[in-house]
Structures are given as C-alpha cells and as structure tokens.
Amino acid sequence: MSDKYKCGTCGVVTDEKSNLCKPVEIVSNTGSCGFDGDLNAMCDSIKDEMHYICDTCGQPAETADQVCVPRMLL
C-alpha cells in the first residue's frame, strides 16, 4: 500500500489523500513524475503545502522524497 497520492485533476503529489480533490494512489517516485499539469490549477486546499518541485518534469510535491529530482521552492 502506498502512502503517496497524486491528484488526478492538478497532478500534485502529497501524503494526505484527504487534501486532494481527485486522489490517485501511487506506488513509487517514478509513478509520480511526468507532470503535465498546470501549477495554477493546483487544488486550493494544498497550494501552500507544496515545498518541492521535480527538476526534471516540474511535478509539485509536499516532500523531497515524493519526486525523482527534488528542488526546494522558494
């Protein structure tokens, strides 16, 4: 069982399933990367919780271990 979820609407990755409008369970970091969403379309309930972004694909994430190549957002 995974403890990471990706929003099916905006693509954000988080550990908190309840914060997402359309949660999809992911199995590994590779499953979470490949972001093709729009950061402006991010669910309002978690915008402030995103502290990292994948430097490869732009996938936003709550923690560094949720993406392949994490970069801290300023």
Image: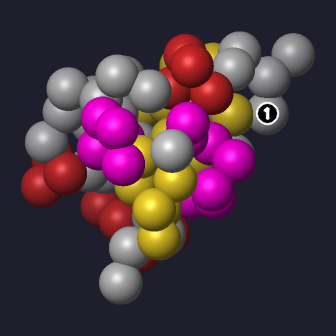
Residue 43 place in picture, x, y as percent: 31, 51
- Does the magenta segment cover residue 29? no
The quadrant in which the C terminus is found is bottom left
Residue in the foreground of this view, choosing between 33 and 13: 33
65 left or right, relative to 46: right
Residue 65 place in picture, x, y as percent: 69, 47
State whether residue 46 appears in this view: no
Q: Quadrant of residue 27?
A: top right
Residue in the foreground of this view, choosing between 34 and 3: 34
The structure residue drawn at horizontal position 62% and vertical position 42%, both measured from the top left corner, is: 66
Relative to 45, residue 41 above or below: above
Residue 28 place in picture, x, y as percent: 69, 20
State whether residue 50 appears in this view: yes
What stretch of residues is rendered in magenta?
55-68
Residue 70 place in picture, x, y as percent: 52, 53
Query: Which residue is tagged 1?
Result: 3
- Does the magenta segment cover residue 67? yes
The quadrant in which the N terminus is found is top right
SS for dot 1? loop
The structure residue drawn at horizontal position 36% and vertical position 48%, both measured from the top left corner, is: 55
Q: Residue furthest right?
A: 1
Q: Amino acid at mark 1?
A: Asp
Q: Quadrant of residue 71?
A: bottom left
Relative to 70, residue 31 above or below: above
Magenta: main secondary structure equals: loop
